[in-house]
Image (spheres, rainbow, N blue to C red):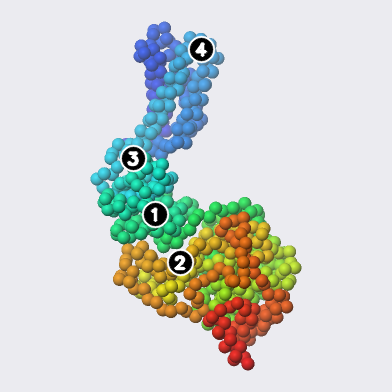
């Protein structure tokens, strides 16, 4: 009953408390001024000026909203408002004394003393309520909770400790913090000391009886994460991580909430410093078309483009169900934006013409593609139809209907392609950069090339997770196979930046993919992060390279060179595209092969256009040529 009354009549109670404290602080100021013995001659001054002070204080506190805040959550902003309100009310009192001719006999130092005491009293009451609420008078959960070591002594750790102070449901006992900044050694944060560096984590786990490690460095690099996580796995200690700011903003996590360390964290990379002004200038208030908008890359492109506030966002895909769910997410996040879902096949020229005629996009992000390497080896006709001829169709419509910019999403598999998929994407690059009618158009055509993205549909991580959930061994093609990896949001951020830099017009941009990762190490770390032991609890089986796969991917060939751009993560690829008299007949040949459904002719066509292709694609092309003779 009492808590209900306190909440129901909270504001009148707060006002009443202030009515009590204002005279007490004012009286104490007089007492300090006269050594606790206020002379009889001064006593009338106190009573005559008290109503002015009470009125000035109440008016100022009301104006600055001090009767509305939750004292249990009082912070620096509330303290600033309190200083402003007390200063304003003291100034008002001084003005009233002047206007009423009472300033002459008034002891001036009382104004200063009252100002200081008011801050101490009203600020102290507020922080006392918060301290009681957060149980600061009780030793740090000394009798319960896991002994926890917090890695990082920055803002994330401060927010985390503050949350643990308030929330009794978190069974945690912070033993200490570790940080590599020498200036933080032996300092305390919310009463928790900094007791070492990250290099000392193994020893601290042993000596301090640590049962849990919390990583409060959401922007940690891959090497930092591995250095922190490895001793935890070796000591069989629980470890968790504070969500990143992006996860908090996206609603995927709550403030103070911890989550398990994921394999993506161990593959994380340095934070990208985004230059969004140019991107926003390109997209804000424009019509933007994203093809393949229901896929992993396309849907993230749509999300990030929507944040740039285009006038209309057209999301096109032939997969109806994924497009439907992508649209639900976009509409929920941007209810006032004109978002248009389009179900269409990019190879359908008539349908593409109607889409471009209706919406006339200013910018086209072409992410639609078939990308599964082994699957496209057995479906070469469809790979050529979609990846190559479909790209030509969309690019021609972009030029015909006056799009300002066309960005092709390409792949590292287009470099020395060993697969049908990689070769068709290389030909797609040649099309957008070398097709005669496109080069004469006013559209800015460019391509962006990057490697694997973590968590995309059909990529290795979801496959590994499905196998583990099913209790099956993890399958890796070869012990030495490596791949470049990048998170989907980072890849799309860089694609958007590459779309905006002027020097990339008419060229291929290559994203900095960092160092390649051994797939077998990826599998081993995923198993360990699940609390299991590789090869003992979960077998890893080597199956051999699949059709069209390479042992190591490349980002450029020996026939290409790169030049830097203003952005450290993006380079320009200087490549020699085929002459129009080679490209146009080659595309005609591919179109004829697709028309009759001839996989052999498709192989011959793409190998002719991509002479730098390598085994096994080159062997397949030679076999097709021999069969044709």
- Which residue is tagged 3? 191
Task: Name the residue nearer the viewer: 397 or 514.
Answer: 514
Q: Distance between the residues labelled 2 and 1?
A: 22 Å
Query: Disc 2 on helix, strand or loop?
Result: strand
- Binning the other alpha carbons within 10 Å of mark 4 as few (below 14), some (14 to 19) or many (20 upward) gives some
- Which residue is tagged 4? 103
- Asked where in the image residue 193 lies, by quadrant, the reply is top left
Which badge, 1 or 3, is on the more N-terminal residue? 3
Contact between labelled residues 3 and 1, with CB atoms less than 8 Å apart = no
Query: Disc 3 on helix, strand or loop?
Result: loop
Numbered marks: total? 4
Label annotation for residue 241 = 1
Q: How far apart are marks 3 and 2 (CA)?
A: 41 Å
Contact between labelled residues 1 and 2, with CB atoms less than 8 Å apart = no
- Which residue is tagged 2? 517
Contact between labelled residues 2 and 3, with CB atoms less than 8 Å apart = no
Can the viewer see residue 221? yes
Contact between labelled residues 1 and 4, with CB atoms less than 8 Å apart = no
């Amino acid at each position: 009953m009492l808590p209900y009354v306190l909440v129901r009549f909270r504001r009148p109670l707060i006002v009443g408390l202030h009515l009590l404290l204002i005279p007490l602080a004012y009286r104490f100021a007089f007492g300090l001024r006269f050594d606790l013995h206020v002379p009889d001659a001064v006593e009338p001054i106190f009573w005559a000026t008290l109503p002015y002070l009470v009125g000035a204080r109440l008016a100022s506190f009301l104006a600055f909203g001090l009767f509305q805040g939750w004292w249990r959550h009082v912070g620096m902003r509330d303290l600033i408002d309190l200083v402003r309100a007390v200063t304003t009310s003291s100034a008002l009192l001084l003005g009233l004394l002047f206007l009423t001719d009472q300033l002459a006999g008034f002891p001036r130092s009382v104004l200063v003393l009252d100002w200081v005491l008011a801050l101490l009293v009203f600020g102290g009451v507020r922080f006392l309520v918060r301290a009681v609420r957060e149980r600061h008078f009780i030793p740090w959960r000394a009798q319960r909770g896991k002994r926890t070591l917090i890695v990082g002594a920055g803002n994330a750790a401060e927010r985390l400790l503050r949350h643990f102070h308030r929330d009794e449901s978190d069974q945690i006992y912070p033993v200490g913090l570790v940080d590599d900044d020498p200036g933080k050694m032996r300092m305390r944060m919310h009463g928790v000391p900094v007791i070492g560096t990250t290099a000392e984590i193994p020893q601290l786990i042993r000596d301090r009886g640590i049962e849990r490690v919390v990583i409060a460095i959401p922007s940690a690099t891959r090497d930092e994460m591995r250095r922190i996580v490895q001793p935890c796995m070796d000591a069989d200690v629980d470890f968790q991580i504070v969500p990143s700011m992006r996860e908090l903003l996206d609603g995927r996590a709550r403030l103070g909430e911890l989550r398990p360390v994921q394999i993506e964290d161990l593959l994380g990379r340095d934070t990208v410093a985004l230059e969004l002004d140019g991107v926003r200038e390109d997209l804000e208030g424009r019509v933007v078309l994203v093809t393949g908008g229901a896929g992993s890359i396309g849907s993230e492109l749509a999300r990030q483009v929507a944040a740039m506030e285009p006038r209309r966002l057209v999301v096109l895909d032939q997969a109806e169900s994924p497009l439907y769910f992508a649209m639900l997410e976009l509409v929920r996040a941007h209810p006032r934006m004109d978002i248009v879902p389009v179900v269409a096949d990019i190879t359908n020229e008539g349908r593409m013409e109607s889409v471009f005629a209706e919406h006339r996009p200013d910018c086209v992000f072409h992410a639609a593609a078939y990308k599964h390497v082994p699957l496209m080896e057995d479906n070469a006709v469809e790979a050529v139809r979609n990846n190559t001829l479909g790209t030509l169709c969309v690019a021609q419509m972009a030029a015909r209907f006056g799009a300002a910019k066309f960005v092709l999403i390409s792949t590292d598999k287009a470099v020395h392609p060993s697969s049908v998929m990689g070769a068709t994407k290389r030909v797609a690059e040649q099309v957008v950069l070398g097709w005669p009618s496109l080069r004469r158009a006013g559209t800015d055509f460019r391509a962006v090339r990057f490697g694997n993205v973590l968590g995309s549909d059909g990529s290795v991580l979801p496959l590994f997770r499905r196998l583990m959930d099913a209790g099956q061994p993890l399958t890796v093609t070869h012990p030495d196979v490596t791949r470049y990896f990048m998170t989907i949001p980072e890849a799309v951020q860089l694609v958007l930046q590459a779309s905006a830099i002027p020097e990339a017009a008419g060229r291929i941009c290559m994203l900095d993919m960092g160092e390649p990762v051994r797939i077998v190490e990826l599998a081993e770390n995923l198993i360990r992060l699940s609390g299991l032991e590789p090869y003992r609890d979960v077998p890893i089986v080597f199956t051999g390279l699949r059709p069209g796969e390479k042992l190591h991917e490349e980002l450029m060939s020996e026939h290409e060179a790169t030049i830097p751009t203003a952005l450290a993560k993006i380079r320009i690829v200087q490549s020699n595209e085929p002459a129009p008299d080679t490209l146009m007949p080659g595309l005609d040949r591919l179109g004829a092969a697709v028309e009759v459904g001839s996989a052999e002719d498709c192989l011959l066509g793409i190998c002719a256009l991509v002479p730098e292709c390598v085994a096994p694609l080159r062997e397949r092309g030679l076999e097709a040529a021999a069969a044709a003779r």
